[in-house]
Image (cartoon, helix red, strand yellow):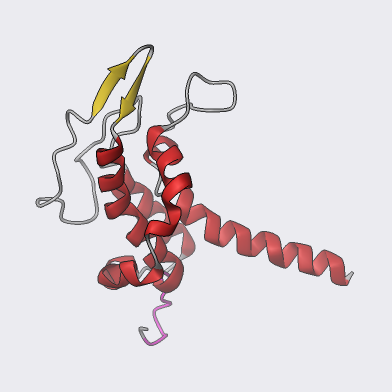
Amino acid sequence: MREENLRAESNTHYTITHLPRRRAVPAHVHLDPHGNGFVGQDSYENYITDHYNNWTADDGEDYIQEAQVQSLDELFYKLAKITKYFPSDAVNGTTSDIPVDTSSWPNTEDWRYWNVNEYEITEGHVNTIGNYLMPRSLSDLQHGVQPEDSPSN
């Protein structure tokens, strides 16, 4: 029984820490098929896999107020809406219905380019996407859910 409890606890921890990171990948929120038998991998997801340690929880400090929500559902939903601003390899980003001010964010309209038989995004652009999304994802993990009757961090 103890082993089952530890496994369940481990699965819950994995789900809670993994879901915000998945919601910070444009290909996932755009439902862009990639990898596992689909043509090509996703430029951003590949980059983040290789450069994940470029960002730390301290990078998310500027987004603490932005991350505070009332439930995990709201946390995942809000991060996914922000992530939709950025393109994936096969889908352009969108500027509609983003729950934060994006007026100073970069114009991503021409970030996708054709390379042999698929679209890709340059390493410089995927790094820029990471600079916007990874700190928010890390902040969400650290400070996200704030029940209405609890004090702020």
Magenta stretch bounds: 144-151
The vertical placement of 34 against 135, above or below, is above
Q: Residue at x 37, y 48 (%)?
A: 80
Residue at the extreme right of the image, as rendered: 1
Which picture quadrant has residue 31?
top left
Mostly what secondary structure, the magenta segment? Answer: loop
- Which one is nearer the viewer's eye here, 112 or 124? 124
Q: Residue at x 43, y 77 (%)?
A: 147
Q: Residue at x 48, y 63 (%)?
A: 72
Q: Disc count in the image?
A: 0
- Which one is nearer the viewer's eye here, 32 or 118? 118
Name the quadrant of the N terminus.
Answer: bottom right
Residue 30 in sight in this render: no
Residue at the extreme top of the image, as rendered: 117
Q: Magenta includes 80?
A: no
In the rendered structure, the answer to whether residue 22 lies left or right of residue 66 reads right
Which picture quadrant has residue 17?
bottom right
> Residue 130 placed where, x, y %?
32, 49
Residue at the extreme left of the image, as rendered: 103
Name the quadrant of the C terminus.
Answer: bottom left
The vertical placement of 30 against 147, above or below, is above
> Residue 106 placed where, x, y %?
14, 44
The vertical placement of 19 against 118, above or below, is below
> Residue 56 placed where, x, y %?
39, 66
The vertical placement of 135 against 50, above or below, is below
Q: Residue at x 47, y 28 (%)?
A: 41
Q: Magenta includes 150?
A: yes
Residue 71 in sight in this render: yes
- Which one is nearer the viewer's eye here, 149 or 102? 102
> Residue 132 placed where, x, y %?
27, 53
